[in-house]
Amino acid sequence: MTTITLGQRLPFIGWSSGADRLGRVEARRMLRHPAYWFGLAYFGLFSTYAVIAVAGGKDEAWNAGYGLVLVGACLLYAPLTVISANRVAAATFRRQVREALDTTPVDARQRTIGAILGLLRGPVLVGVAAMVLMSVISAASSPPAGGSAKSFAAPGLLEHLQVPVLVLGAGLLGIAVARWLPVPGALPLVVLTLWFGTSGLYAPADANGLVHAPTWFAPWVVWAVENTGAVLRQPLAQEMWHLVYLLGLSVLAGVAALLRTPGRRRGLLVTAAIAVISTGLAGWQQLG
């Protein structure tokens, strides 16, 4: 029988107990990153606005609550996770993380795996919590003031699966940038390029509340339509293909981060090829 000792790698994966321990440390460091404090301050201002809207009769409490979680998870937490994951992943190479590395030496591949495990155990779990909360609130939501029941339908749990995947993709992008571009200013340049490069993909929903290409190719959730102030439920089949599309992009970012490290590449290249095919297929199928 094969036994795995401290620091020993599992075959073909590169994972070790040292990387696992490092992942627990990285999860705490990501969750405590100062970037989230900025988001919390902005979220407080948005919450004040929502309370005023409810008190003034302009919106219902359930709808305002859903909007708060939507903004907090998708428009604040996910983008800020790019910063948190990037800074933590980069710091692992700049200085020693004593809790995990003093006792067990880990190489660049395992450090990267540790950062990915930290992302899964920290920010992504926050995304899962937001997913559950949004699903509960949406079940009690109703058409917002000025909206119509025809154009409004609360997304369900399946649609909300995109929320933790969005956080996952943001974090993996941050880790990949930390590995490939470990220079000052690289992260904001990449983020701004992604932002302006994909902003043109957004197109308002039509009169029936449906979105069309090229919005489906945007790396965000499409059922949040900001220009109407409503949450519009799209056909479930398209939403599920968009979920696969987002997951494929996330996997590609994770593979890119691992390819920057020494170690076996065949499995990573096969994974990348499968992700490219899956993402391309999902991208086509999500158009309906």
Image (cartoon, helix red, strand yellow):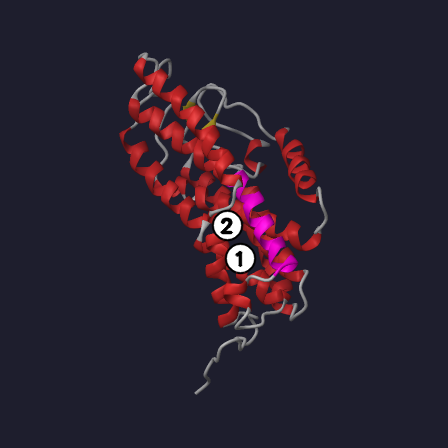
Amino acid marked by disc 1:
Ile
Residue at x 66%, y 55% (from the top left corner): 179
Which one is closest to the eye, mark 2 or mark 1?
A: 2
Rendered position, 42 above or below 164:
above
Residue 15 disc label:
none
**At numbered mark 2, what does the secondary structure look like: helix, strand or loop?**
helix
- Name which of mark 2 and mark 1 comes first in the sequence: 2
Q: Quadrant of residue 104?
A: bottom right
Q: In this image, 79 relative to 194: left or right?
A: left
Rendered position, 138 above or below 165:
above
1 magenta-colored: no
* Main SS category, magenta section: helix
Range drawn in magenta = 78-95
Asked whether the viewer can see residue 176, the reply is yes
Q: Split into 4 quadrants, where in the image is the N terminus? A: bottom left
Where residue 277 appears, as percent x and y from the top left, is 60, 53
Residue at x 64%, y 56% (from the top left corner): 256
Residue at x 37%, y 34% (from the top left corner): 155
Where residue 24 appears, as percent x and y from the top left, is 46, 60
**At numbered mark 1, what does the secondary structure look like: helix, strand or loop?**
helix
Q: Which is more toward the observer, 134 or 76?
A: 76
What separation in Å lies between label 2 and label 1 (alpha carbons)? 11 Å
Q: Which is more toward the observer, 36 or 247?
A: 36
Query: Which residue is under mark 1?
Result: 116
Query: Which residue is under mark 2?
Result: 30
Where residue 196 appears, as percent x and y from the top left, is 66, 31
Badge 2 crowding class, 10 Å Cα cut-off, few under 14, some 14 to 19, many 20 or more, is many
Q: Which is more toward the observer, 254 or 81?
A: 81
Where residue 185 appears, as percent x and y from the top left, is 71, 41
Q: State yes or no: discs 2 and 1 in contact (Cβ < 8 Å).
A: no
